[in-house]
Every structure is written in structure tokens, then in C-alpha cells.
Image (spheres, rainbow, N blue to C red):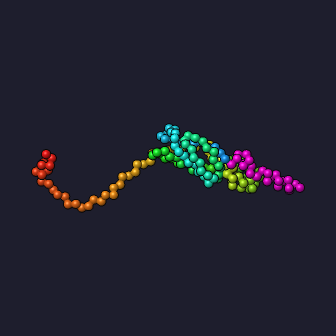
Amino acid sequence: MKRILALSAMLALTGCASVLSGKTQPVSVTTVLDSKEVAGFGCTLSNDAGNWSLTSPASVIIHKSTADLAINCKQDAYVGNTTAVSKANGAVWGNILVGGGIGYIVDRSTGAGFDYPQNIVVTVRQLAAPAITSSVVLEDVPLKLMSPSQSAARVN
């Protein structure tokens, strides 16, 4: 009977982070150019659990994951990108200690035991101007030299 109670208690405690912190998280994105906050950038956030869009500065609720969160922002000739690292939160460590490996596996598979930074700053920069290339091929054309009197006649 004690074994059944102990097993039931362990199973009840598994997925603790899923219960305590949930599977979603709000994150705020701010864009910065030359150390000043700028607004109006279209940003896409993505991890292996989904994709989300916003216009900076703004917040969005994302699905947690063990994978890092990629943030890409763009407006006209300006772009910026960064990565928010997914880190284990306190609930997952408690779950490992109390629930053992089963709880950790549940929290890892749902992403609930991991968090991203709440505030993400994306530094943007101007895209480099495209290099001008010429597709004109100059052929070897014989040059006709003009005498000084012909040059003077052309100027007049």
C-alpha cells in the first residue's frame, strides 16, 4: 500500500512546471538604432513551437520551448535580429529533485520548465547599399587622335 501511495504521489508531482508556470509566456520586444529606441519595426519571433508577429515596441504571448527563440525585425532599409536563449526555470529543478526524471521529461517535452527573457532588445542597422555593377563590356575600339587644330575647332 505504501508503494502505491508513493508512486501515486510521484506521478502527481510530475509535470510540476506545467502546472506552476504554464506552457506560454509573454515577451516584449524593443528595437534600438544608435542607442535610441525606435518604433514601427515588423518583427517575427519563432521557435520549434510556432511563429508570432508584432510591430515594435510590443508584447506577444509565445509557446515555451527548449529551443532558442529567433527574433527578426525589419523596416524599409533597416534590419535586426537576435536570439533569446531558453533557460530552465526554478520549477523544473524542483521537479527533478522531487519527481525525478519523469517530471523533467514532461516539463522538457512541453517546454513548461523553460523560460525566455521577458524583455528582448533587438539592435537594428541599415542595410548596406547594393554595389553597382555594370554588365556593359567595352570592346577594343581604336582611338582616333585629333590634331591640336581639330581640338580647337571642336571647342569653338
Q: Is residue 116 visible?
A: yes
- Residue drawn at x 38%, y 52% is 131
Q: Quadrant of the N terminus?
A: bottom right
Q: Residue furthest right?
A: 1
Q: Residue pushed farthest bottom?
A: 140
Image quadrant holding the C terminus, namely top left
**Quick one: 96 or 46, which is closer to the camera?**
46
Say whether residue 88 is visible: no
Q: Which residue appears at 53% of the width and 48% of the height?
A: 72
Left or right: where 21 falls relative to 31: right
Residue 32 image offset from top left, x and y in percent: 51, 41
In the rendered image, which quarter is residue 57 located in? top right
Q: Magenta stretch: give its range.
A: 1-23
| 112 part of magenta stretch | no
Residue 149 sits above or below residue 138 on the image = above
Which secondary structure is most common in the magenta stretch? helix
